[in-house]
Image (spheres, rainbow, N blue to C red):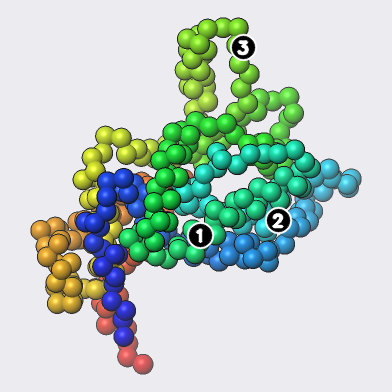
Amino acid sequence: MVTPLKREEWDFTGLSTDELIPALLWEIRRERPEVDQVDRTTELWLAGKLSIKRPLMPKGKRTGKRPRYNSNFSEADTARLRATAGFDAFVPFGEFIWRDGTQRQRGMEYNRWLAGHIRPLIEHRNKPWLCLPRDEARRLCDIYEQGRNTRVVRIGAWWDAVAQFRKDQPDRGSPLKFDFCEYTSVLLTIDWRHSKKRILTAFSKLLDQLKPADFSHIKRWDHRGKKNRDLLVILERFAIMRLLHRYTLAEIKLRLPDAWGLYSHRKWYDERRQALRDFRELMHHRDADKYFPKSWETKARRVKRAGSLPAK
């Protein structure tokens, strides 16, 4: 027997205005097709079951001399880097303070701190936003609000630069600038003898130089200029997509009269197609156009496909 779709999966009318964006980000992550595999490896990382040893360097990169470092990441490193996929808005990265100690000690301290924030997110990952405990939802809203501006421009971590150096092994005399997905990290030197106005003017000119050569893959999305109703409409499109994934239109009208009444004035399949466009825009992924939400395929299509198969 098919488990009925919870009301919290398709009815977002009870959301408060300050929850709209966090709820949208949460539901986007739940629809990402790769998160199941990411979450499985994250659980292994949290349990300490992944190797911290880096794999051997490929034979083509070996010089015959003992390398000073291995540019490959261990299983634990890879899982940690991927653990925040879709959760980056709900982890207060700016709160972590790097303390004195060896590189190994600092890394272990950071891992413990990050695990403390990732663990409750993984625990609730399969729940709709409206099914989260209210204290947890409030905590995530507060983290999102605090980090909203710091995510635009922030001071990078040494870890990012060291990891990129190990990966690309650039000339040590070249400028410290590298691109990663939608981000650009640089090392800046500021001469404070100049006025604030002149420094800001120099920053403005520098932005044009820092802009990635291939800027086409970066899809901008900003809630500014979008009214609360616009954000709610995006969530409602996801609701319609989920309903069509679980039921046919005839079944929705019969089994979920409340859902049918809530969206009866909408063009269901047009809204579903727009949900796909919203999903890809909000993924912030270089290859977003290749991805489909987990709830994309409709039940009507599955029934039609099954009907065309020869009987066994």
Q: Quadrant of the N terminus?
A: bottom left
Image coordinates of residue 22 in percent, x first then y, are 37, 49
Q: Secondary structure at mark 1?
A: helix
In contact (CB < 8 Å): disc 1 and disc 2: no
Q: Position of residue 60 (x, y in %)?
A: 77, 50
Q: Which residue is mark 2?
A: 74
Quadrant hosting residue 4: bottom left
Q: Are marks 3 and 2 in contact (CB under 8 Å)?
A: no
**Disc on the earlier residue, 3 or 1:** 1
Local crowd at mark 2 within 10 Å, few (<14), some, or many (≥20)? some
| Residue 125: image location, x then y, percent | 45, 62
**Spatial distance from mark 3 to mark 1, Cα to Cα?**
43 Å
Instruction: Please name the residue shown 30% across and 35% down the image.
Output: 224
Q: Residue 180: which numbered mark, if any?
A: none
Residue assigned mark 3:
191
Q: Which badge, 3 or 2, comes first in the chain's sequence?
A: 2
Give the numbered dot on residue 120: 1
Disc nearer the start of the sequence (1/2): 2
Residue type at mark 1 is Pro
Direction from residue 184 to residue 278 in the image, left or right: left
Q: CA distance from mark 1 to mark 2?
A: 24 Å
- Image quarter hosting the C terminus: bottom left
Instruction: Tell whether 287 sits left or right of 95.
Output: left
Q: Which residue: 73% across, 58% down? A: 52
